[in-house]
Amino acid sequence: MSSTRSNIKCAACKKRIPDHEPDLVLQDLEAKPGGARRRPRYFHTRCGDAAYAAYAAYVAASEKPGVYLLTVRHVEEMAN
């Protein structure tokens, strides 16, 4: 049986996020010039502070902050 999530690693600690563990997803919702979007970054729920720090770094590095979405992706499909 194959998993729908393929080898996702935490952007903070670089360790694999197991399928049975919920995670945080940080997404940039605005398209960049050329129509490309930044790929979402995944974090363990225990690395949540690093997700907030990544968002703060995006805002500090850009003149126009943009729109970002930080969501919790649960293990049970019905919870999402």
Image: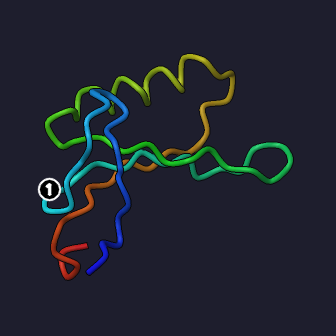
Q: Residue 74 appears at what percent x and percent y?
A: 20, 64
Element under disc 1: loop
Q: Nearer the viewer, residue 37 or 11?
A: 11
For label 1, the crowd category at 10 Å Cα-Cα, with few meaning under 14, some 14 to 19 and many 20 or more, is: few
The answer to whether residue 79 is left or right of residue 41 is left
Can you tell which quarter of the image residue 51 is in? top left
Image quadrant where one finds the C terminus: bottom left
The answer to whether residue 11 is left or right of residue 27 is left
The answer to whether residue 16 is left or right of residue 53 is left
Instruction: Tell me which residue sits at (27%, 61%) in the image.
Output: 73
- What type is the residue that disc 1 sits on? Glu
Q: Residue furthest right?
A: 34
Which residue is label 1 attached to? Answer: 21
Instruction: Tell me which residue sits at (22%, 42%) in the image.
Output: 44
Image quadrant where one finds the N terminus: bottom left
Q: Is residue 9 above or below residue 75?
A: above
Instruction: Tell me which residue sits at (31%, 76%) in the image.
Output: 2
Q: Residue 17 appears at what percent x and percent y?
A: 24, 48
Q: Is residue 62 above or below residue 42?
A: above
Can you tell which quarter of the image residue 60 is in? top right
Q: Nearer the viewer, residue 74 or 53?
A: 74
Q: Residue 49 appears at what percent x and percent y?
A: 23, 27
The answer to whether residue 4 is left or right of residue 63 is left
